[in-house]
Image (cartoon, rainbow, N blue to C red):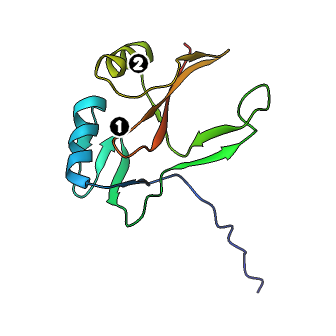
Amino acid sequence: MEQMKRKTVLTGIDGVYIPVSNRKQSEAWYIEHFGLEHGEDYLLAGRQEVFLRERLDQQVLTFRTNQWLENGESYEMPVVCFRTSDIAGLYDYARSKGIRVGELSEHNWFREFDFYDLDGNKLKVWQPNE
């Protein structure tokens, strides 16, 4: 009898890990400014688990690429991208609170901006155009 081969597949992302220097302080910051909620040992962005873990070095979540900007220039790419339903309101709020943000960019089918957390992790937030 021939055995069926089982295809192993990834079915989703269950957690994102963000390096921080002070977990409690960072948790409070993400909750206050971005509306994340407490889980058991993590925060929730919608149904996505976000784990803040104290780092032992100065590593932040970015890498350089030339495959993001239309002109092919080098870009410091965030590893984590959040979604929002009110990007303009979130952008205005972040700026009013002194959070370091990039420009709010408009594209054909979405809007986005980059922001930095307390530890200098560059993160992205986007909203599809409806």
Q: In the rendered structure, which amino acid carries the disc numbered 2? A: Tyr
**The image quarter in which residue 96 lies:** top left
Q: Is residue 91 above or below residue 67?
A: above
Mark toward the viewer: 2 or 1 = 2
Q: Earlier in the sequence, mark 2 or mark 1?
A: 1
Q: In this view, does 104 lie above or below 49?
A: above
- Please provide percent x and percent y for residue 31: 24, 37
Question: Which type of secondary structure does the marked residue at label 1 adopt?
Answer: loop
Q: In this view, does 79 lie to the left or right of 19?
A: right
Which residue is identified by label 1?
Answer: 46
Residues at badges 2 and 1 in contact (C-beta under 8 Å)? no
Q: How far apart are marks 2 and 1 (CA)?
A: 19 Å
Q: In this view, does 124 lie to the left or right of 108?
A: left
- Please provide percent x and percent y for residue 90: 37, 19
- Please provide percent x and percent y for residue 93: 32, 17
Q: Is residue 68 left or right of residue 113?
A: right
Q: Can you tell which mark lies on residue 114?
A: none
Of the 4 image quadrants, the one containing the N terminus is: bottom right
Q: Can you tell which mark lies on residue 91?
A: 2
The residue positioned 54% from the left and 23% from the top of the image is 112
Q: Which residue lies furthest to the bottom in this view?
A: 1
Q: In the rendered structure, which amino acid carries the disc numbered 1? A: Gly
